[in-house]
Image (tube, rainbow, N blue to C red):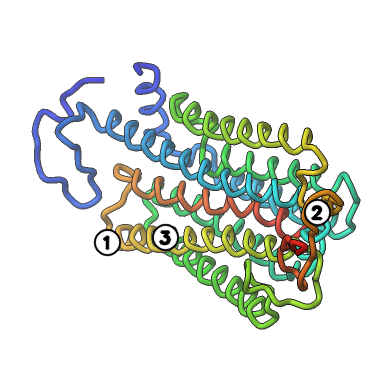
C-alpha cells in the first residue's frame, strides 16, 4: 500500500474518515480498530462465560428446582424476545450494508427499526420482571414464591435476574451506540468510505444477540 | 500483515454488498427456523437429551450469527484468532468445572442426605437454603 494517502493531512470532509497520525494508511487504521473491537468482544464472551459457569454448577446441584423454575417463565414472551433480537440483528447487518452502498436513508430507517426492536425487547423483559416481582419469584433471601418450593429455586432466580439483567444492560448500551450511529448516518458523517464505526456498532449489537441465543434455551427451555 | 492489508482493501472496495442482501435474509430465516425447533424440542421436554440438544441448536445459531452477520467468514485471521480463542478458553473453563461436578463425593453435594454423624440439616422454609441445626 502506498503511503500517499496520509501525505497531506487535511481535516476530513463529511463522509470522510479521520486518520490518526500513528497510522500509515486508512486500511491499517481500520484493521487495528477492528482487531480492538474483536478483543473487546472476546472479553465480553469471558464475562458471560463466568456467569454461564455459575449457571452450570447450580443447575447441576439443583436440577429439579431449575427445571420447575424454567417451566414457570413465559415461553411465549421469551420466544417473542428471541425473534425480536434476531430480527434486529438482521436489520443492523442490513443497515451496515446500506451505509456501504451509500444508501444512508435506507440505513437510517433500518437503524430506527433496530432501535425500536431494542425498546421492544426491554419492554417485554420488564413485563416479565414485573410478573416475577408480583409473584415473589426473586433472588436469594427475597424469594417467597409458594408454587416452587424445591430447594435451589431462589438460586435459579438469582441467576435469572443477574444474567438477564446484565444482558438487558448490554441492550441499553447497544441501543445508545446505535442511536449515536444513527445520528452519524443522518448527518452524512458515515459513508462507504467511512463505515468502520457503523460496523463496530453492529458488531456490538450482534454480540447482544449472541448472548441471548444461549440465555434463552438455558433459562426458558430446560 | 501484508496479506491482511490486501484482503482488507479488496473487501473495502467491494464492500459487504458483494454478498448481497439474500444471504442475510437466508441466515435470518435459518435463525428463525432453529428458534422454532429449539422451542418445540424444549417444550416437548425430551428428558436427558433436552439440554445437549438446546445447547447444540444455540451453538449452530451463534455460529451463523458470527460467520455471516458479524462477517467472521471474511474477516482477517487475527480477528478470528482473538475471538475464537476467547470461546475456547470459555469452553476449557466449563469443561474443567464439569470435571469437578462429575467426580464429587456425594456428601459434598447440597442434595446429599443429612448425615447422621454431623449436624442435622433442616430445610426451614420454602425455597430457603438449608440451615444447619445443632443439637444441644
Q: Which residue is most to the front?
A: B136
Question: Percent position (x, y) of residue A198?
Answer: 38, 50
Residue depicted at x 26% and y 20%: A1
Residue depicted at x 43% and y 37%: A38
Number of other residues with Cα within 10 Å of mark 1, as a class: few under 14, some 14 to 19, many 20 or more? few
In three-dimensional space, the C-alpha distance between marks 2 and 3, rounded to whole angstroms, equals 33 Å
Q: Which of A197 and A63 is in front in this view?
A: A63
The residue wearing badge 3 is A173
Image quadrant in which the C terminus of chain A is located: bottom right
**Which disc number belongs to residue A187?**
1
Disc 2 sits on a residue from what chain?
A
In three-dimensional space, the C-alpha distance between marks 2 and 1, rounded to whole angstroms, equals 53 Å
Disc 1 sits on a residue from what chain?
A
Question: Percent position (x, y) of residue A34?
Answer: 38, 36
Nearer the observer, disc 3 or disc 1?
3
Secondary structure at numbered mark 2 = helix
In three-dimensional space, the C-alpha distance between marks 3 and 1, rounded to whole angstroms, equals 21 Å
Task: Please check whether the numbered discs 2 and 3 fall on a single chain.
Answer: yes
Q: Which residue is most to the top?
A: B2
The residue wearing badge 2 is A63
The reply, left or right, for residue A193 in relation to residue A22 is: right
Residue depicted at x 40% and y 46%: A200
Label 2 vs 3, first from the N-terminus: 2
Label 3 vs 1, first from the N-terminus: 3
**Corner quadrant of residue A189:** bottom left
Amino acid at each position: 500500500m502506498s503511503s500517499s494517502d496520509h501525505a497531506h493531512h487535511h481535516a476530513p470532509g463529511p463522509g470522510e474518515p479521520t486518520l490518526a497520525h500513528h497510522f500509515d494508511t486508512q486500511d491499517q487504521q481500520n484493521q487495528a480498530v477492528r482487531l480492538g473491537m474483536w478483543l473487546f468482544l472476546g472479553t465480553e464472551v469471558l464475562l458471560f462465560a463466568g456467569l454461564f459457569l455459575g449457571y452450570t454448577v447450580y443447575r447441576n446441584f439443583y436440577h429439579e428446582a431449575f427445571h420447575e423454575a424454567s417451566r414457570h417463565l413465559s415461553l411465549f414472551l421469551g420466544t417473542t424476545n428471541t425473534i425480536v433480537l434476531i430480527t434486529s440483528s438482521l436489520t443492523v447487518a442490513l443497515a451496515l450494508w446500506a451505509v456501504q452502498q451509500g444508501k444512508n436513508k435506507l440505513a437510517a430507517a433500518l437503524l430506527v427499526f433496530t432501535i425500536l426492536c431494542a425498546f421492544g425487547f426491554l419492554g417485554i423483559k420488564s413485563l416479565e420482571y414485573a410478573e416475577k416481582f408480583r409473584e415473589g419469584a426473586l433472588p436469594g433471601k427475597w424469594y417467597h414464591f409458594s408454587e416452587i418450593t424445591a430447594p435451589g429455586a431462589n438460586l435459579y432466580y438469582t441467576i435469572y435476574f443477574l444474567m438477564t439483567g446484565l444482558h438487558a444492560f448490554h441492550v441499553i448500551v447497544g441501543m445508545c451506540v446505535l442511536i449515536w450511529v444513527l445520528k452519524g448516518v443522518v448527518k452524512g458523517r458515515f459513508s462507504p468510505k467511512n463505515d468502520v464505526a457503523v460496523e463496530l456498532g453492529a458488531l456490538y449489537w450482534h454480540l447482544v444477540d449472541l448472548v441471548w441465543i444461549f440465555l434463552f434455551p438455558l433459562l426458558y427451555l430446560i | 500483515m501484508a496479506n491482511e492489508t490486501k484482503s482488507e482493501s479488496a473487501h473495502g472496495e467491494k464492500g459487504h454488498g458483494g454478498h448481497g442482501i439474500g444471504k442475510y435474509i437466508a441466515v435470518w430465516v435459518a435463525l428463525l427456523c432453529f428458534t422454532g425447533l429449539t422451542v418445540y424440542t424444549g417444550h416437548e421436554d425430551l428428558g436427558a437429551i433436552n439440554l445437549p440438544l438446546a445447547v447444540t441448536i444455540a451453538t449452530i445459531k451463534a455460529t451463523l450469527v458470527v460467520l455471516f452477520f458479524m462477517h467472521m467468514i471474511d474477516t482477517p485471521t487475527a480477528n478470528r484468532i482473538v475471538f475464537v480463542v476467547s470461546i475456547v478458553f470459555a469452553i476449557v473453563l466449563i469443561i474443567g468445572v464439569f470435571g469437578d461436578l462429575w467426580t464429587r463425593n456425594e456428601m459434598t453435594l447440597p442434595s446429599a442426605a443429612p448425615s447422621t454423624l454431623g449436624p442435622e440439616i433442616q430445610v426451614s422454609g420454602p425455597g430457603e437454603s438449608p440451615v444447619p441445626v445443632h443439637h444441644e
